[in-house]
């Protein structure tokens, strides 16, 4: 039951679970959407990989191993795409705490911050007229 | 869409077919000829009914630099995941973040995509925007204490690009890298 | 072994609860999307931990589905929110801001 393979598997599972917990912690503690993206998607990529490795070691039979490998590959391929899409929208809707930014080379210093209130994009008009959106 | 010789089209699509068949077999979990044949049929149906513009062009895989790239990538992943986890746990929380732009040097769709993916996957940095024309990549950084850290992170993105070009870049990409250096 | 199981489920359950807290708190739609994404990935990690501890491969296909669902859901919501941004711009690139709320449109005109 407790061969070296099992010990390795348990270590991987523990590390992965710990990373999942820190992802949750970061989600609650970080100040804005972009930093929460870091917390949500990042320790997770490694966390899920570790959990999958642990599972692959513990499960016998190649069928399950291949499927776990596939899940890991899908995670690696899709996580950056979804993170990019969310963060781009978040930046353009200015869900960014600018007071916490050390450098902002996208905004070029001339920010005229607009404050949006409410949840939905259509909830309330912005407080200031927004400047043109950077990029396309 | 421009008409191209059947041979080049085939050359571009063979890797895609192999990848799709591989995914199909992995999904079923067992190797059998029935799976291979049905996978081939599904892959061909996907390629015929949902055609994609191909990005793979002028790629030359060099095994040793590719291993170097993956090694650095795995190390980055471990170190930065620990950093982000520590930032989430430590009493102070997030102190400062930064948004920086980095001028990349290569002009290949595939390499730009992979640089963006690798940068996004490594914790602590998040790609906000990728300007294809200007080859500018905009990155949000979580862990920066001072200007030196910002410069270091920018260097990291460029170094990832260098490693990637050495691993899979064409001769033209390598030349672009040399010219910029 | 049983102790390890408890520790693992506690860690993952804690992560899931914190993600749920962010889902409830908001404050914006995008925060909730990020929280949902994280929650789904934590759930898939939990399923994998269950499969590993019990040596039970029956939940593995569910993992594939959950991980793909998380991606599709996130991307579609991001496109939905992003589409509102795009539609708020005129053809010559002038930014009109975001659409006016429905109540306001009815009240004003």
Image (cartoon, rainbow, N blue to C red):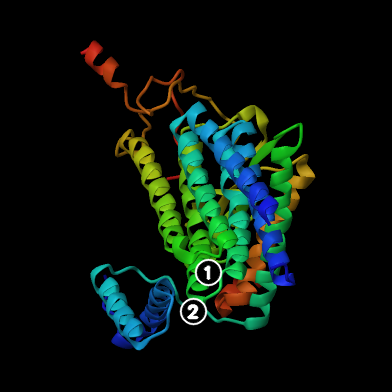
Q: Residues within 10 Å of mark 1 (few under 14, many from 20)?
A: some
Using the image as rendered, state which of residue B43 and residue B96 is in the foreground: B43
Residue B46 placement (x, y as % from top left): 28, 71
Determine which residue is flagged by label 2.
Answer: B58
Determine which residue is flagged by label 1.
Answer: A69
Name the side, left or right, on which C4 lies relative to C106.
Answer: right
Are the numbered discs 2 and 1 placed on the same chain, yes or no? no
Q: Secondary structure at mark 1?
A: helix
Asked which quadrant contains residue C93, the reply is: top left
Name the side, left or right, on which A32 lies relative to A12.
Answer: left
Using the image as rendered, state which of residue C46 and residue B116 is in the foreground: C46
Using the image as rendered, state which of residue A117 and residue C64 is in the foreground: C64
Relative height, residue B165 to residue B5 (above, below): above
In front of the other: label 2 or label 1? 1
Can the viewer see residue B166 in this picture? yes
Residue B78 placement (x, y as % from top left): 71, 58
Q: Chain of mark 2?
A: B
Relative height, residue B110 to residue C42 (above, below): below
Q: Residue at x 51, y 27 (%)?
A: C25
Residue B70 placement (x, y as % from top left): 65, 70
Q: Quadrant of the N terminus of chain B?
A: bottom left
């Amino acid at each position: 039951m407790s061969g070296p393979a099992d010990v390795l598997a348990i270590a991987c599972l523990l590390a992965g679970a710990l990373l999942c917990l820190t992802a949750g912690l970061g989600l609650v503690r970080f100040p804005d959407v972009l930093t929460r993206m870091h917390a949500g998607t990042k320790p997770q990529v490694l966390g899920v990989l570790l959990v999958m490795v642990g599972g692959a070691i513990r499960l016998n039979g190649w069928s399950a191993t291949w499927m776990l490998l596939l899940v890991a590959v899908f995670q690696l391929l899709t996580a950056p795409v979804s993170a990019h899409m969310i963060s781009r929208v978040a930046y353009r809707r200015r869900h960014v705490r600018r007071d916490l930014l050390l450098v902002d080379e996208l905004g070029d210093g001339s920010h005229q911050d607009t404050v949006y209130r409410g949840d939905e994009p259509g909830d309330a008009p912005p407080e200031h007229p927004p400047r043109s959106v950077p990029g396309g | 869409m421009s008409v191209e010789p059947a041979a080049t089209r085939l050359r571009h699509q063979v890797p895609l077919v192999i990848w799709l068949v591989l995914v199909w077999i992995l999904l079923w979990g067992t190797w059998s000829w029935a799976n291979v044949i049905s996978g081939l049929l599904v892959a061909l149906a996907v390629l015929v009914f949902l055609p994609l513009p191909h990005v793979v062009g002028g790629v030359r895989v060099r095994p040793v630099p590719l291993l170097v790239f993956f090694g650095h990538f795995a190390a980055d992943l471990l170190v930065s995941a620990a950093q982000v986890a520590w930032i989430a746990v430590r009493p102070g929380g997030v102190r400062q973040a930064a948004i920086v732009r980095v001028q990349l040097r290569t002009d290949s769709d595939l390499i730009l995509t992979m640089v963006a993916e690798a940068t996004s996957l490594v914790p602590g940095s998040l790609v906000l925007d990728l300007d294809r024309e200007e080859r500018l990549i905009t990155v949000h950084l979580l862990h920066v204490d001072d200007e030196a850290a910002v410069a270091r992170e920018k260097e990291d993105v460029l170094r990832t690009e260098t490693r990637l070009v050495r691993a899979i870049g064409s001769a033209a990409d390598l030349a672009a890298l040399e010219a910029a250096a | 072994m049983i102790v390890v199981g408890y520790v693992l489920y506690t860690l993952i359950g804690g992560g899931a609860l914190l993600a749920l807290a962010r889902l409830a708190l908001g404050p914006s739609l995008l925060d909730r999307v990020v929280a949902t994404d994280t929650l789904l990935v934590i759930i898939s990690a939990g399923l994998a931990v269950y499969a590993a501890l019990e040596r039970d491969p029956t939940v593995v296909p569910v993992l594939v589905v959950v991980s793909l669902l998380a991606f599709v859901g996130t991307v579609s919501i991001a496109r939905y929110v992003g589409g509102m941004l795009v539609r708020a711009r005129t053809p010559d690139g002038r930014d009109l801001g975001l659409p006016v709320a429905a109540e306001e449109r009815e009240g004003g005109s």
